[in-house]
Image (cartoon, helix red, strand yellow):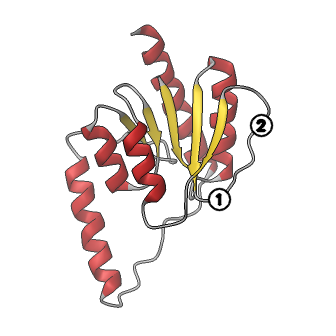
Amino acid sequence: MTIWVDADACPRVIKDILFRAAERTQTQVFLVANQPLATPPGKWVRSLTVPKGFDVADNHIVAQVQVGDLVVTADIPLAAEVMDKGAQALNPRGELYRDDTIRQRLNMRDFMDTLRASGIQTGGPPPISQSDRQDFANALDKYLQQQRRS
């Protein structure tokens, strides 16, 4: 099992949680971004730099992900693609995307994109809160424990 991180937009506090979990559980974590990223010393966390361009990091993750892997992303289309390949997707706020709701989430995202394209200000998500950090850490631990049992 490998954890893939859509790292360009992943908050630093979430990366720190992933770094600690990788070392503790000896799980490989790949940060995929279009710029070099600093990683802690050790063999469990690696940074992969892909060329700049629209969805290049996402496409790399989709090409590499395997059944049973986990992808950390707030990008709903990326989450849907990796789920189609048998991987799991977790957003940085601790929500594990589910098969029964991902299409609905895609439709809402597309609707919001249409609103923004027509000039309506929809605002962005709020900053990651302490509660979000805890939810993410708990969801990650639960996922890692389930993978160890299977």
* First-in-chain label (2 vs 1): 1
Please tell me how crowded label 1 is: few (under 14), some (14-19), or many (20+) other residues with Cα within 10 Å.
some
**In 3D space, how far apart are the residues under numbered discs 2 and 1 (Cα atoms)?**
16 Å
Q: Is residue 98 visible?
A: no
Please tell me how crowded label 2 is: few (under 14), some (14-19), or many (20+) other residues with Cα within 10 Å.
few
Q: Nearer the viewer, residue 107 or 135?
A: 107
Residue placed under numbered mark 1 in the picture = 35
Which of the 4 image quarters holds residue 61?
top left
Q: Which mark is residue 109?
A: none
- Point out residue 20 in the picture as x, y percentages from the top left corner: 70, 30
Q: Is residue 146 visible?
A: yes
**Could you tell me the amino acid type at mark 1?**
Gln
Residue placed under numbered mark 2 in the picture = 40
Judged from this view, the residue extending furthest toward the right is 41
Residue drawn 69% across the image and 23% down it: 23
Residue 55, above or below 132: below
Question: With 72 as the anchor, is 13 left or right in this view?
Answer: right
- Point out residue 116 in the picture as x, y percentages from the top left corner: 35, 82
If the image is split into quadrants, where does the C terminus sit? top left
**Could you tell me the amino acid type at mark 2?**
Pro
Residue drawn 40% across the image and 35% down it: 65
The local secondary structure at tag 2 comes to loop
Question: With 140 as the anchor, is 130 left or right in this view?
Answer: right
Q: How many marks?
A: 2
Residue 145, above or below 46: above
Q: Nearer the viewer, residue 130 or 67?
A: 67
Residue drawn 23% across the image and 46% down it: 101
- Point out residue 29 in the picture as x, y percentages from the top left corner: 58, 33
- Point out residue 57 in the picture as x, y percentages from the top left corner: 48, 54
